[in-house]
Amino acid sequence: GHVHLATPLAAGPLLAASARPVGRHLVVLGRITPYKGQHVAAALAHRLRRDVVLAGPVGPYTTALELATAGEQAATNPDVRYWYEQVAPLVDGARVRWVGSLAPAARDRMVSSAAATLFPLDWEEPGGTAVVESLALGTPVIGYRRGCLPELVSSGRTGWLVEPGDVDALAAAVDAVSRIDRTECRRDAVERFTPARMAEQYLALYRTVLARTARTAAAVPTRALPPRW
């Protein structure tokens, strides 16, 4: 069995996170790395003429100033090379912006007012913390159907999932994001991703494991030990 991640954001009043006015911008959360696909999101922004905000560190560097003053040793980091080679050429400060790592409150304001969060993943993402946070804030999720996303996102109800690498389908999903009910995103998170729900799932999993262990132990024949004289 398995237990999904949780977020305290899902434990508040049902519509509290959905009251913020919604803009047209899209958000990509997470460290800047090829696995997260920020270059795909940035290219999509220019193609669709929609603003995209990239939020997350580049390697160990959490701000543009840190990265700019890091010196030549920064280039030894593969995520930094990815940034300079594939992402930075698309970041113009207007259509595509990199805001570095944000404090939780600022991140939540940005996500809750976004049209959607983007996850054009290039690997089998196992966790999905940013996914459940987005849904808890009432913001639909758009991404590739891989890793944990099919378990967390109901395509057509709380977001859109498309086949990995299909950028045309990803673009169509962005165009169709207004068809997703943001209240439903929030409601789904409240039902599935609260800390209390996660605790219940862990307890159920532990009970299952203990019961299975007890049955296995009962089925193993015991051998009498020789007397100790």
Image: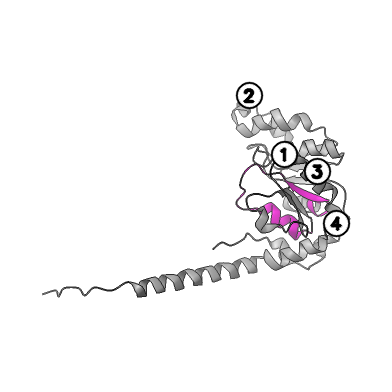
Residue range in magenta is 110-139
Label 3 sits on residue? 171
Tag 4 secondary structure: helix
Kindly identify the residue that appears in the image at 63 percent across and 27 percent down. Answer: 75
Label 4 sits on residue? 179
Q: Which mark is residue 72?
A: 2
Q: Amino acid at mark 1?
A: Gln
Tag 1 secondary structure: helix
The reply, left or right, for residue 77 in relation to residue 176 is: left
> Image quarter for residue 132?
bottom right
**Which is more N-terminal, label 1 or label 3?**
1
The answer to whether marks 3 and 2 mark residues whose Cβ atoms lie closer than 8 Å is: no
Kindly identify the residue that appears in the image at 71 percent across and 30 percent down. Answer: 86
> Image quarter for residue 59?
top right
| Front label number (1 vs 2) | 1
205 falls in the magenta region: no
